[in-house]
Image: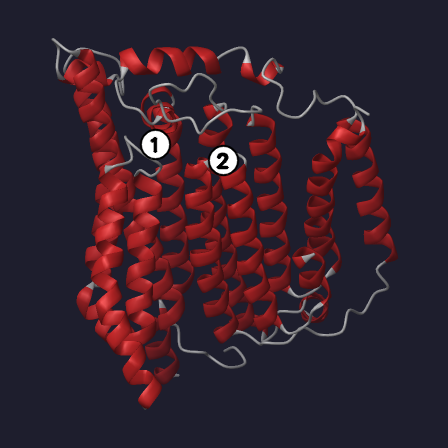
């Protein structure tokens, strides 16, 4: 059990850092490499690491499957919803300039932030859900 | 070289580990080709997620691959012929890295120049991805979501199936 | 001399053919998916090579930098990477189901069981 102890302690120390880095990448996608996809995958990787070290039951308590499914749908809806809001404000679909009519550039910035948020949410929750599904499948042996 | 070793090895666990290595090497290659966004994504996705998913699949299936039953002459011939055609095609490709290649002259300069005023964020890749080509990114998000739903449909009914098997 | 300048494309073609060979010739389904991923990654390398400008910096606007690498292929490849992982995940889920239905992941044995039907 010695090596399991080391693994647990190191993981407990690392996981908040990984999640923080994921959040950083998400919101700094405008100024450096990064953005929604990278951030989503980093957060999913953090959750997978947690599952590998602490077990599937604990991980499912942290992120229940129903919540993950809702999050992945919500991410796509946020993205599409931003486009629809743009249409309601009088522009074309996904024309972010309409969000702040005086400064189209600021509107673009807000629009990009919103859609990247949607993308990151969907990517993180879907990848984690796929991993939970694959890992939760008991090896059914030689078929039915 | 990692690719050739992946072909020849039959211990699938080693294959997956080598695949992670291959992915990490190509991420390093992307960095030297001045593509940090892509390197980032490829490193996390390829060396992280794909490798982990394949390991999970290996845990559910077997670890070793069987001896190939056919002699590989036909696939080898197909691969060599296709490779030969592609190499013949590279003779027409413009030189590597020249600034006046056709790929660099039509839309890209417009994005690079106008992105500063029209959108105002330094990362041009993000601005193209989320604003100029935002519709494609919406489609991509839908693809990820659909893949997740597909996996749930294929594998998610575990509990129901187990109950039905107990009733039989 | 101009021909020799293309050798990096030849390396990419070699990787592509390696991936293709794995998909066609190996019967084990998991290895086929690994080969597919090798193929996809080599295509990404090719695209990024097309987008490279000699002496260009990464396409992030900065003071004092005049030559940038072309951002368009980067955008395409970002999308392609994520779509690739979605395809891989779905393919692996299919492999797991096949294993449960047929008891094996070797293509030849699956064909035999299908013909027995």
Residue with the mark numbered 2:
C77
The image shows residue B59 at horizontal and vertical percentages of 48, 75
Q: Secondary structure at mark 2?
A: helix
The answer to whether residue C42 is above or below residue B52 is: above
Which image quarter is the C terminus of chain C in?
A: bottom right
Q: Residue at 34% of width from left, 29% of height from top? A: B126
On the rendered structure, is A12 left or right of C18? Answer: left
The answer to whether residue C109 is above or below residue A115 is: below
Q: Is residue B131 visible?
A: yes
Q: Secondary structure at mark 1?
A: helix
The answer to whether residue C95 is above or below residue A87 is: below
Identify the mark at residue B138; answer none if there is no mark. Answer: 1
Identify the mark at residue B53; answer none if there is no mark. Answer: none
Q: Residue at 40% of width from left, 64% of height from top? A: B155
Q: Could you say which is closer to the camera, residue A85 or residue A3?
A: A3
Residue situated furthest front in the rendering: C64
Q: How far is disc 2 from disc 1 in space, using C-alphas?
A: 15 Å
The image shows residue A27 at horizontal and vertical percentages of 22, 38
Label 2 environment density (alpha carbons within 10 Å; few <14, some 14–19, many ≥20): many
The answer to whether residue B27 is above or below residue B60 is: above
């Amino acid at each position: 059990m010695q090596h399991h102890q080391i693994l647990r302690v190191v993981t407990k120390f690392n996981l908040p850092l990984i999640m923080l880095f994921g959040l950083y990448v998400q919101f700094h996608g405008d100024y450096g490499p990064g953005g929604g996809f990278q951030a989503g995958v980093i957060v999913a990787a953090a959750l997978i690491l947690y599952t590998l070290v602490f077990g599937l039951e604990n991980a499912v308590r942290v992120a229940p499957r129903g919540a993950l499914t809702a999050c992945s749908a919500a991410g796509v809806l946020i993205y599409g919803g931003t486009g629809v809001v743009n249409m309601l404000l009088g522009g074309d679909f996904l024309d972010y300039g309409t969000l702040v009519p005086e400064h189209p550039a600021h509107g673009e910035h807000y629009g990009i932030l919103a859609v990247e948020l949607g993308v990151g949410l969907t990517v993180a929750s879907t990848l984690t859900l796929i991993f939970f599904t694959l890992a939760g499948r008991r090896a059914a042996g030689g078929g039915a | 070289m990692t690719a050739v070793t992946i072909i020849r090895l039959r211990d699938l666990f080693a294959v997956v580990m080598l695949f992670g290595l291959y992915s990490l090497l190509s991420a390093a290659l992307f960095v030297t080709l001045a593509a940090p966004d892509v390197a980032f994504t490829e490193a996390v996705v390829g060396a992280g997620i794909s490798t982990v998913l394949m390991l999970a699949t290996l845990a559910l299936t077997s670890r070793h691959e069987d001896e190939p039953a056919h002699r590989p002459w036909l696939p080898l011939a197909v691969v060599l012929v296709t490779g030969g055609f592609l190499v013949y095609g590279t003779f027409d490709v413009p030189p590597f890295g020249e600034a006046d290649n056709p790929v660099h002259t039509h839309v890209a300069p417009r994005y690079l120049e106008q992105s500063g005023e029209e959108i105002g964020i330094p990362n041009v890749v993000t601005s193209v991805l989320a604003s100029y080509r935002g519709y494609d990114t919406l489609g991509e998000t839908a693809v990820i979501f659909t893949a997740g739903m597909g996996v749930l449909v294929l594998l998610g009914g575990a509990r129901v199936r187990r109950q039905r098997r107990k009733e039989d | 001399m101009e021909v020799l300048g293309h050798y990096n494309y030849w390396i990419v073609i070699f990787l592509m053919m390696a991936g293709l060979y794995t998909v066609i010739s190996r019967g084990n389904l998991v290895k086929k998916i690994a080969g597919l991923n090798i193929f996809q990654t080599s295509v990404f390398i090719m695209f990024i090579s097309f987008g490279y400008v000699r002496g260009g910096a990464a396409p992030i606007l900065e003071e004092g930098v005049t030559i940038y690498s072309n951002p368009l292929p980067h955008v395409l490849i970002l999308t392609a990477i994520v779509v690739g992982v979605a395809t891989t995940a779905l393919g692996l889920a299919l492999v797991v189901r096949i294993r449960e239905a047929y008891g094996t992941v070797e293509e030849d044995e699956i064909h035999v069981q299908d013909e027995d039907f």
